[in-house]
Structure formats: C-alpha cells, structure tokens
Image (cartoon, rainbow, N blue to C red):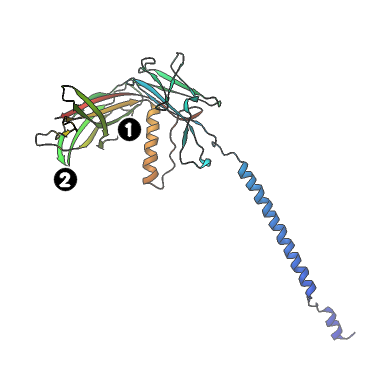
Amino acid sequence: MNRQNISALLKKPEKKFTSNSGCEKGSVVILIFLFVTMGFTSCRDFFVSEVENIKFPGSESQLVVNIFISPQDSVIRVFVERSIPYVRKSNVATEPVGNTARVYIAAENTDYLQLSYDFDYKHYRISTRDFPVVENKKYRIRIETPKGEFARAECIIPAFRISDFEFSDLVYQQDQWGNNMAQFDWKFRANAASGSQFFRTGAYNVHYDVFSDGKGGKTIIGPQIMELWVDKGITLFADEKRGTYSFRAQYHGNPGSNKTFSARLASSNEGNSIVSVDSIFVYVIESDMNYYRYHKSINDYFYYGDDFPFSESVHIFTNIEGGLGIFGGYNIRRYLISTISK
C-alpha cells in the first residue's frame, strides 16, 4: 500500500446527508419540541388547578363590628356587618347581616343583656336607661350568628381627669383672601396620677333656625353641625407626663361692626321670620386605648396613603376577637364658647 492510500484511509470522511436523512433529523427536532411543549402544558395545568383550589388566608367572610360607648350616650348602638373578601371583586367592603345576629352586652361581673334590632336604621340598640354606662368600669360584647360565627371584645370607660381648662374670646379678622373669620384658643392639662391618658379634642359650630309660627310659639329647626378647622395643636394624642396642651380653631363667618355675626334673617312663605342662632363648642374626649389606637390608625391610613408614596402599609387597629372592627369607650365634655343670635 503506497503513501497516498494510507493517507486516504487515515483521513476522516465528510458526512453527507441525503434527502431522507434530512427528514429524519427534522422528525427528531419535532419530537423533542412536542415533548417539551407537553411538559410545559402539564405544568401549567398543574399550577392553574392549584391556584383555582388554593385557600388564601383570611379570604373567608368575617363579622365586622363597630361600637363606641360613653356615659353621655342615651342609646348604645352596635353595627354588625359581614366582610366581603377581596377575591370576590366587589365594589363594597361589607354586606349587611340584618337581624339574623344575636348581640349581647354586659358590664364586668354581670349577666349579658340582648340588644334589639332597629329595622329603620339597620343596627342593634339598647337604651342606657336599661343599661347604664359609668366610668371606671369594663364592658363586654358578644355577637353570634346562625352561621356559627362568634365575635367578642372588651373596653373600659376611663374617668374624665383633665384640669385647668381655659378658652379665649373670639377674635375677628380677615383671612388671606379677604373673607371674614373668627378664631379662638383653648387649653387644658392632663391630670392622671399615673399611666397613659388618651385624648381627642376639637371645636364645632351648631346652627339653629328658630321658626316663629306667628302665634307666639317657636319651633327649633335643626341643628346643623359643622366641624371647625384646628390650625394649632394635635387633636388626637396620648399623654404620659401630665402635660398642658394648647389649641386654636377658626370659624369663617360674617362678623358685624358690633363684633357679632350678622343675623341670617329670612322669611317663610307665610311671612313669618326665621332667627339664626350660632353656638360654638369645644369638646374634650378622654378615651380608652382601643378608641385611641383605632382612630390613630385611621388618621395614619388616610395621611400616609396619599401623601407619602414610600411609607409602609398601615394596618387598621381592631380589637374584635373572632372578627374585625372596634369596641371602644370614652368620656366626653362639651364647653360652650359663644352663642351669637339675632
């Protein structure tokens, strides 16, 4: 065998595909693609079935309870609804329970009393003549439904312990837009011997229209209540140091030359006069921790939710065991600042 034949034997031959071999290669590629596709399809079916059958935590409906009580109330009202889970894609968050629930309330170490259902206003109620609320006592509520739902909570009515309450006279002036306004200040001191106190304060205007019937009698029409803007002081706060707190509110009205608001006089169809009476009040609430934490979380939710995009999520406070909502107690005092009428 010569050198050329040996070189030919050692040289690796080049592979040449015929038309049949091309079909075989394409078939292999198609089979691989089908197997991979079937694998993804089976995985997709698996995950979809799991998602459709998964039970998200907290996705079941819960009782939603709302009740605040104080010694100044004449009626105790309990609002009971049922939450609508987010996965149901509803435009509302709750749905009414109606009169199907059984709602009970009791003072500490006493038996429960059942509340009646008010069909007109859609809540449960009991008169404080039948169930008086007094300070320094703990109270309990219990709610049951035919569906087996059960919720309960406790709250306490704090004693009212502020001192050194003072307020200033109304000062009339014009705001930056040239509108007439009045402003006034008030302050008070927290007066607990120890521990935390929780407060809420503010001011409001009550407007009454007194209608004269032309026969010597008068009928009060109203009242209309308007919360006043507080531009000095934090109105919801906790105190641990028995501090003194100052506030200022504004009342936008029409002060006259004699430093009284101009009368809003009108005439009825019969020609009888309507006399306007404006009264300005300051209120001070001393509450339990439940009342304070619930309203603080509501304030934080609306403030940080819109104004600060990098804030952490705000959880609305609830003290309802077995459901959602709030059962809080408070004690309130109202102080008449001024009465202006003509």
- Dots 1, 2 in contact, CB < 8 A: no
The residue wearing badge 1 is: 236
Tell me which numbered mark, 1 or 2, is placed earlier along the sequence. 2
- Which quadrant of the structure image shows residue 256? top left
Could you say which is closer to the camera, residue 226 or residue 269? Answer: 269
Where 44 falls versus 139 (above or below)? below
Q: Position of residue 31 (x, y in %)?
A: 74, 62
Which of the two discs, 1 and 2, sits closer to the camera? 2
Q: How many labels sit on residues?
A: 2
Residue sticking out furthest to the front: 270
Quadrant that contains the C terminus = top left
In percent of the image, x 46 and y 13: which residue is there? Answer: 111
Query: Is residue 339 something that shows in the picture?
Result: yes
Report the amino acid beneath label 1: Leu
Residue 237 image-quadrant placement = top left
The x and y percentages for residue 164 are: 22, 24
Q: Residues within 10 Å of mark 2 (few under 14, many from 20)?
A: few
| Secondary structure state at the residue bearing disc 2 | loop
Up the image or down, 287 lies above or below 298; here it is above
Q: Secondary structure at mark 1?
A: strand
Question: Which quarter of the figure is the N terminus placed in?
Answer: bottom right
Q: At 29% across and 23% down in the image, what residue appears? A: 191
In this rendering, would 53 be left or right of 321?
right
In the image, 223 versus 93, the foreground residue is 223
Density class for disc 1 (Cα within 10 Å; few <14, some 14-19, many ≥20) is: some
Across and down, in percent, residue 281 comes to 23, 28
Quick one: which residue is furthest to the top in this view?
110
Q: Position of residue 160 (x, y in %)?
A: 31, 21
CA separation, marks 1 and 2?
31 Å
According to the picture, the residue beneath numbered tag 2 turns out to be: 178
